[in-house]
Image (spheres, rainbow, N blue to C red):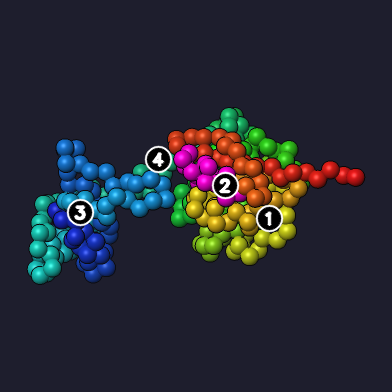
């Protein structure tokens, strides 16, 4: 295997990357800040859910892997010959050892502790001895592997409110990988509806539910019907505000609404959005994220 290393200005990163992958037989392309580790290093990460402050670095290092040296040489020659590629430079072309990328990737993901007795466990790991309950979940395309603070806070809430789930209807709106829906089923929920606008997430949820031997109903958002004892939504603040009438309307009398994907500074906005229906409160926080919950008023029996 051979690695071609290129130096490119910001404007060329995307077209060069596309050409390498789509037309020049590159197996993979990675992009790094060419000034990393120097005073010129520049972070590109904005706040969660917000665009990065810039689309790329002023100078980037591109590393492209090829099966053979002739393929790498051909790619470099063709790129440098393009009239639009002014400013592109070849830094190196060298042979690299093949590695077990699957094993390397797997080694980066360990079991995640939700509580001392409840864990998220990748399929290639054994559950910890203390795990009374665990979810088998591998990193994939759908959001929700238990590593993000918003997911962990939702899971902690589920583990702490097992009594509210027993035999009850639960709605996981914006289910992603299905992790919250699966957790609710494992903690005794009766019927669990897991819904998402992304068909890939619905497919992922069904596959993960089968892998964890739980029964739930996964589908698109129009599959939500009636009221639920617990409504879970781990999305982001803006869609949560827009969905306020819908989500609040699905909470049964005495039921719980659990919202995540919210930054600390967004708490008041969410409280205002849901005020006509429910009184949201901050129930948990981690790394600048918060969990907000509310309980619908239980109508007294005559």
Whichever of callouts 4 and 3 sits on the residue coming sooner in the sequence is 3
Q: Quadrant of the N terminus?
A: bottom left
Q: Residue 249 carries which label?
A: 1
Proximity of marks 2 and 3: CB atoms separated by less than 8 Å: no
Q: Is residue 171 above or below residue 40?
A: below
Whichever of callouts 2 and 4 sits on the residue coming sooner in the sequence is 4
Name the secondary structure under disc 1: helix
Whichever of callouts 3 and 1 sits on the residue coming sooner in the sequence is 3
Whichever of callouts 1 and 2 sits on the residue coming sooner in the sequence is 1
Q: Which of 132 and 157 is in front in this view?
A: 157
Q: Residue at x 32, y 46 (%)?
A: 45
Q: Residue 62 carries which label?
A: 3
Q: Can residue 60 be seen in this view?
A: yes
| Mark 4 crowd level (few <14, some 14–19, many ≥20, 10 Å Cα) | few
User: How far is disc 4 from disc 3 in space, using C-alphas?
Assistant: 25 Å
Q: Is the magenta stretch mostly helix, strand or loop?
A: helix
User: How far is disc 4 from disc 1 in space, using C-alphas?
Assistant: 43 Å
Magenta span contains residue 270: yes
**Snapshot quadrant of residue 206:** bottom right
Name the secondary structure under disc 2: helix
| Mark 2 crowd level (few <14, some 14–19, many ≥20, 10 Å Cα) | few
Residue furthest to the right:
302
Proximity of marks 2 and 4: CB atoms separated by less than 8 Å: no
**Snapshot quadrant of residue 73:** bottom left
Q: Which residue is drawn at 45% across and 55% down?
A: 141
């Amino acid at each position: 295997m051979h690695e071609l290393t290129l130096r490119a200005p910001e404007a060329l990163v995307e077209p060069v990357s596309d050409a390498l992958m789509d037309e020049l037989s590159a197996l993979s392309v990675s992009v790094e800040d060419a000034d990393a580790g120097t005073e010129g290093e520049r972070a590109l990460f904005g706040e969660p859910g917000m665009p990065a402050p810039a689309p790329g670095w002023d100078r980037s290092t591109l590393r492209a892997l090829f099966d053979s040296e002739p393929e790498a040489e051909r790619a470099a020659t063709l790129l440098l010959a393009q009239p639009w590629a002014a400013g592109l430079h070849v830094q190196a072309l060298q042979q690299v050892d093949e590695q077990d990328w699957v094993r390397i990737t797997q080694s980066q993901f360990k079991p995640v502790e939700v509580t001392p007795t409840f864990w998220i466990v990748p399929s290639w790991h054994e559950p910890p001895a203390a795990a009374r309950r665990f979810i088998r979940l591998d990193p994939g395309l759908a959001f929700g592997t238990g590593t993000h603070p918003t997911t962990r806070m939702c899971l902690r809430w589920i583990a702490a409110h097992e009594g509210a789930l027993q035999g009850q209807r639960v709605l996981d709106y914006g289910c992603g990988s299905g992790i919250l829906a699966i957790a609710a089923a494992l903690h005794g929920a009766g019927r669990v509806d897991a819904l998402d606008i992304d068909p890939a997430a619905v497919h992922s949820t069904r596959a993960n539910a089968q892998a964890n031997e739980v029964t739930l109903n996964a589908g698109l958002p129009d599959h939500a019907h009636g009221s639920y004892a617990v409504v879970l939504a781990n999305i982001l603040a803006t869609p949560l505000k827009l969905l306020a009438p819908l989500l609040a309307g699905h909470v049964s009398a005495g039921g719980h609404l659990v919202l995540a994907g919210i930054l600390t500074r967004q708490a008041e906005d969410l409280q205002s959005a849901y005020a006509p229906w429910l009184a949201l409160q901050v129930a948990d926080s981690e790394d600048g994220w918060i969990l907000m919950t509310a309980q619908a008023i239980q109508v007294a029996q005559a």
